[in-house]
Image: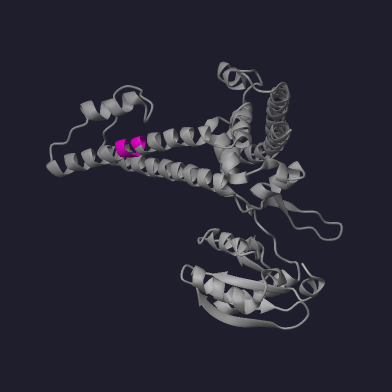
Amino acid sequence: MSKSIVESRRFVGLDVHADTIAVAVAEKEGEVRSLGTIPNRLSSIRKLLAKLGEPGSWRACYEAGPTGYTLYWQLTALGVECVVVAPTLVPTKPGDRVKTDRRDAERLARSFRGGELTPVWVPDAAHEALRDLVRAREAAKADQLRARHRLSKFLLRHGRRPSQNIRAWTQRYVDWIRREVKFELFAQQATLEDYLAEVDHMGQRIERLEKAIDEAIEGAPAAMKAVISALQALRGIAKMSAVTIVAEVGQLSRFAKARQLMGYSGAVPSEDSSGDRTRRGAITKTGNAHLRRVLVEAAWCQRYSPGLTRTLRERQKGLPPAVVEIAAKARHRLSARYRRLLARGKPRQQVATAIARELLGFVWAIGVEVERTVAA
């Protein structure tokens, strides 16, 4: 790239919607002006490229959102340097109550020029495909929970309860509903059968998605597959949790320190300090909610004694000794920390969140170790 191009580089802010893109440009030293609105089509983006000049003379940014990364891939394929930024971290002026697409694009361009934007990780094709599949299963699990709630509340409303002590949603519980729950009125019986059919449908849907995830893991790149296997050495992280972590985070070694991964998850405490006063509050939650959910679920398993169970021993078979050693250290440390925090009177939910944050450190350590080994 020539020196003249570098010196004349401009910063372009894009406010992206499904059908339109509002465009604004900030000169390296000068005004910020709107270039209007263009259709969200590749042909229009090519015309914009011709209008703004050589790809190396300008950089573009837009906020992460429901439109995904299609525009990012289109611009990078055309040779334009593009950055996808975190929308919650875009600076705004206090008291500014006017919001339009044009003003949003100008604000992005101005903040981009000032270096005030925080980029997000753009997944490659393999990670994005796996993440779509994992999130589809997550949505199916949520739908299954709603279907089960509808059926259980229907039975409760009509006073239908099992005579024996049967745990809800075990096979015995479903068999009891099919065998013993009957209604005299046609409308109520039809409602019961519909709710049961929906529960069955959700179970079959989840089973299909989990089989698809298994096939996707088999066809995944070697490094991704190795990290998924290695993370299962940790207590509380089975296959689906490990796949979710890898799909949501991507390459773990892209974080220089474990604390950066903790911040990415949004599991770090908020802070409001001034002068000699230091005040920390609830976690920020300005991070990946899917990652945070599986880590908190895994954290509840740390309340047990740090012994090595049969299931965990099976998951650790064939893994590198370094990974098994990190997992053993995590087991003992997190179990002791859980009991210590609980003894100090901390609420269980806060304890689980603190353990999840520390568990991320061990996830990072295992990921970096495996990725380094595979690369070597």
- Between residue 241 and residue 333, name the one nearer to us: 241
Residue at 60 percent of width and 29 percent of height: 229
State the residue in front, 16 or 220.
220
Whether 305 is drawn above or below 151: the answer is above
Is residue 340 covered in magenta?
A: no
* Residue 96 in view here: no
> In the image, is 283 to the left or to the right of 195?
right
Main SS of the magenta part reads helix
- Residue that sits furthest to the front in the current view: 2
In this picture, is 14 found above or below 122? below
The residue under the point 26% across, 38% down is: 197
Q: Vertically, is 71 above or below 298?
A: below
Q: Is residue 312 left or right of residue 133?
A: right
Residue 114's quadrant in the figure? bottom right
Coordinates of residue 58 in the picture (x, y in percent): 69, 71
Near-viewer residue (273 or 221):
221
Q: Residue 31 appears in which quarter of the rendering?
A: bottom right
Q: Is residue 311 visible?
A: yes
Q: Residue at x 38, y 40 (%)?
A: 144
Quadrant that contains the C terminus: top right
Which segment is the magenta one?
A: 200-204
Image quarter hosting the N terminus: bottom right
Instruction: Find residue 214 and report its horizontal and vertical position in percent.
Output: 48, 32
Residue visible at 13% across and 37% down? 184
- Extreme residue toward the top, this view: 310
